[in-house]
Each structure stands twice: as C-alpha cells, then as structure tokens.
Image: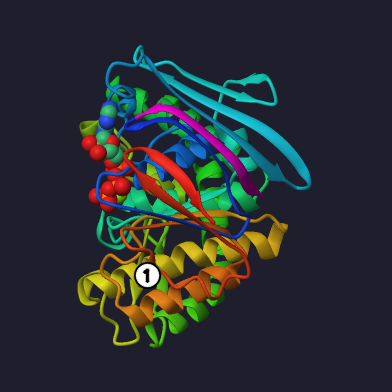
C-alpha cells in the first residue's frame, strides 16, 4: 500500500494542495504554522476518516469554507484506488472509494493502513489504557480476519448487560447476556494475548536498536482476575456491578505495560526521549509484523521528527523506519535535521503558508 497522489482543499490553511508522493520517504519541511502537520492530518483523514487533532469537523475546516475535502490515489495489492473523504460544517462525513459511497471507515483502513507518531505519542505509554487497547486492536483488525465483527459482538453483549444491570435485572436475565459476553470476551482476550506474543520479538529487536538497551517485556492484563473465567468473574460481581450499573470485568478493561529488565515500569522510568523511542518501537513493530504476516505495507506519519530526539537517535530511527518497508511522511522545520540517506528514494517538499511544493 502506498499513497501515490494527494489533493487537499479547505483543510485549515491548506486551500488547494496537489502533489504526487514517493512510495518510500516524503520529507515535508517548513516554518512553524506553515501547514506540515495539516498535510499529515489530511492523510490521516483519508485512512481513518477522522483527524488526530480534533473530533470537531468545524475546527479543521478552513475558516469561511463549508467543507474540507481530501482525495487520494492509493496503490493497494497491485490495484490503484481513488479515495475521497469530505467533512462539512454540518458535521457530515462522506467517504468514497472508486466512486462508491462507504458507510464505515473500515474499508479505508484496509486500503491505507496508517501509523502515526507525534510529539504527543509518549501517551501510548503514559496515558489511558484505552490507547493501549486501541494499539492492540489496530494490529488485530489488520491481521485477524473477523476481529472487528467479534469486537462489535462483544460490545453489543456488554451494552445489553449494562442496560440490564441499570434496570435491576435478576440473575436469569443477566445470565442470558453473560454467556455471549464471556464467550466473545474470552476470544478477544486470547487473540490479544497471541498478538502480543507475535509482536514481542519484532518489538524487542527494534527497541534494542533504537534505545541500545535490553528491551522491556510486554506485560498484558486481560481485564479480569487470572484465577477466574470471564463467566465466573461476571457472576461473582453481579451484585456490586448492579449497584454501579456497568460491567467491570472483561477485555474492555484490558491493558498492557512495558516492564524493564530492572522490573521497573517503562512509563515511570524512561526519559521523555526514551519514551518516544519506545513508542516508535511499538508502532514500527506493528507495521513490520503486518507486512511479514500479510505482505501489506503501511504508511507511517511521523510528525516533527526532531522533537526530543538527539542527532544519533534521529538517524537510527530513520534507518529502522526505512528497513521496516513502510511508506513514510516526515515533517521537520529544518530539512537538515532529517537524515534521508537510509532511503533509496526520497521526495522533499517545501511547505509555506499552506502551499506544498516539491523540491527538485
Ligand atoms: N480552521 C482553520 N482555518 C484556517 N486556518 C487554520 C485553521 N486551523 C488552523 N489553521 C492554521 O493552519 C496553520 C497550519 O498549522 P500546522 O499545525 O499544520 O503547522 P505546522 O507546519 O505543522 O507548524 P509547526 O511546525 O508549528 O508544527 C496554522 O498557521 C494555523 O493557524
Ligand atoms: Mg506541526
């Protein structure tokens, strides 16, 4: 998969941007406020139908305009797809692939598997468990056929049990939802655990390379006590959860931590730059694993590469990304801060006041 061509209009300060991109490295250079991150935001909208900066369409649509439109040509498995995403101030999102309207964004994600690393990305380690679950589920969505359906089924049972708890339902009614909930929940947990095992060696070698240190262990929590089956945990907590009105056990409460060889928690021990590199290792490991298992390439959006990384780490990171086989879009305020030498092919773009021009 690779984004070959991008057109953006009405997105923040990008009035009308059109360019062809390299299937390897694309370096976007420009002053603060020039529109670099907005180009990455456009690509993110194309692959995920949402921004990584705001959930509010109104904020990302150019002031005075009624819609932001992104169009891309994407090569996936030897076939070129025309993909369009439009957000309007009336908060309507329209998705199109090859002229057909789409109802959900999952097809976009299949065509353009994306990973994003920004200056805020350390929050994968230090932030809410929700982010780490989303990380695992990104991987499972792409490598495990039927995972999305399984997850939706689990969520439906969960909502039904929560509604029953709130209505003060008795054991017989709760049991009806708990069977389906525990069955789908146990499967989700097994798939996540197997996924963690699969990416651990890939993550370990990338981490060792990036941080020049022994890698941490990914310690997973599946979301309910080890000694109980999910069904047993649900039954046991009926009374306490009845008072709360929601379910406390299950894979919707799962999490993982990075445990360093010293047994300390990486989120509480690593420096900010090291945390960023650990997150890079996690994200690049997913892309590399996806490519190994399915042959599909990812596109990595790397915003403000120099932030918090010294010159050596920036170089090693570029080597690792190049070796991962991903297409990459990198932004920087100064092109000299990014070493393009690990890449056989690179396109450099200058971004100024919302205009993107390829430097040849
Ligand atoms: N809704 C909007 N309408 C018009 N302009 C906007 C809107 N939202 C943001 N902008 C402007 O768009 C520009 C794009 O900002 P962007 O974050 O892409 O810059 P950048 O090149 O990544 O800068 P930095 O190097 O500081 O990260 C900013 O100048 C911002 O003021
Ligand atoms: Mg920026």
**Does 3 appear above or below 135?**
above
Vertical arrangement, residue 218 with respect to residue 176, above or below: below
Left or right, 24 with reference to 165: right
Q: Give the range drawn in magenta.
A: 1-11
Nearer the observer, 313 or 5 = 5
Residue 5 belongs to magenta span: yes
Q: In which quarter of the image is residue 4?
A: top right
Q: Disc 1 marks which residue?
A: 336
Position of 323 compared to 211: left or right? right
Residue extending farthest top: 90
> Which image quadrant is residue 13 in?
top left
Q: Does the magenta stretch include residue 102?
A: no
Image region (quadrant) for ligand 1: top left
Residue sitting at x 45%, y 49%: 230
- Up the image or down, 264 lies above or below 166; here it is below
Q: Quadrant of the C terminus?
A: bottom right
- Residue at 32%, 29% in the rendered image: 60
Q: How crowded is mark 1: few (under 14 residues within 10 Å), some or many (20 or more)?
A: few
Report the front residue among 266 and 313.
313
Left or right, 45 with reference to 327: left
Q: Is residue 330 visible?
A: yes
Q: Residue 217, position in %: x, y? A: 41, 77
User: What sort of colour scheme is used for the picture?
Assistant: rainbow
The quarter holding residue 345 reads bottom right
Query: Where residue 118 appears, x then y in whole percent?
Result: 34, 55
Provide the secondary structure element on which disc 1 rests.
helix
Residue placed most toward the observer, 165 or 1: 1
Rendered location of residue 152, percent (x, y):
52, 33
Question: Residue 12: horizontal and vertical position, in percent?
Answer: 32, 31
Q: Is mark 1 within 8 Å of ligand 1?
A: no
């Amino acid at each position: 998969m690779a984004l070959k061509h991008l057109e953006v209009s009405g997105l923040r300060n990008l009035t009308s941007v059109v360019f062809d991109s390299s299937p390897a490295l694309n370096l976007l250079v420009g002053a603060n406020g020039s529109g670099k991150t907005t180009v990455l935001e456009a690509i993110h909208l194309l692959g995920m139908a949402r921004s990584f900066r705001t959930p509010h369409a109104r904020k990302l649509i150019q002031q005075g305009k009624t819609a932001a439109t992104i169009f891309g040509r994407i090569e996936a498995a030897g076939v070129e797809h025309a993909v369009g995403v439009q957000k309007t101030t009336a908060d309507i999102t329209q998705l199109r692939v090859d002229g057909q309207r789409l109802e959900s964004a999952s097809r976009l994600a299949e065509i353009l598997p994306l990973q994003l690393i920004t200056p805020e990305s350390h929050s994968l380690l230090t932030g809410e468990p929700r982010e780490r679950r989303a990380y695992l589920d990104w991987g499972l969505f792409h490598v495990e056929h039927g995972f999305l359906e399984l997850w939706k089924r689990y969520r439906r049972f969960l909502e039904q049990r929560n509604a029953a708890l709130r209505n003060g339902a008795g054991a017989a009614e709760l049991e009806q939802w708990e069977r389906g909930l525990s069955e789908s929940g146990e499967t989700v947990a097994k798939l996540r655990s197997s996924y963690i095992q699969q990416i651990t060696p890939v993550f370990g070698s990338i981490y060792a390379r990036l941080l020049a240190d022994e890698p941490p262990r990914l310690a997973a929590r599946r979301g309910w006590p080890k000694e109980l089956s999910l069904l047993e945990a649900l039954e046991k907590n009926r009374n306490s959860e009845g008072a709360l009105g929601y379910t406390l056990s299950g894979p919707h409460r799962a999490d993982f931590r990075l445990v360093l060889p010293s047994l300390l928690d990486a989120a509480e021990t690593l420096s900010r730059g090291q945390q960023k590199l650990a997150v890079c290792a996690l994200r690049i490991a997913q892309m590399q694993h996806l490519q190994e298992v399915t042959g599909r390439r990812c596109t990595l959006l790397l915003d403000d590469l120099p932030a918090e990384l010294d010159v050596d780490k920036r170089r090693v990171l570029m080597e690792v990304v190049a070796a991962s086989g991903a297409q990459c879009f990198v932004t920087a305020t100064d092109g000299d801060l990014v070493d393009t030498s690990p890449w056989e092919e690179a396109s450099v773009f200058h971004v100024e006041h919302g205009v993107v021009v390829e430097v040849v």
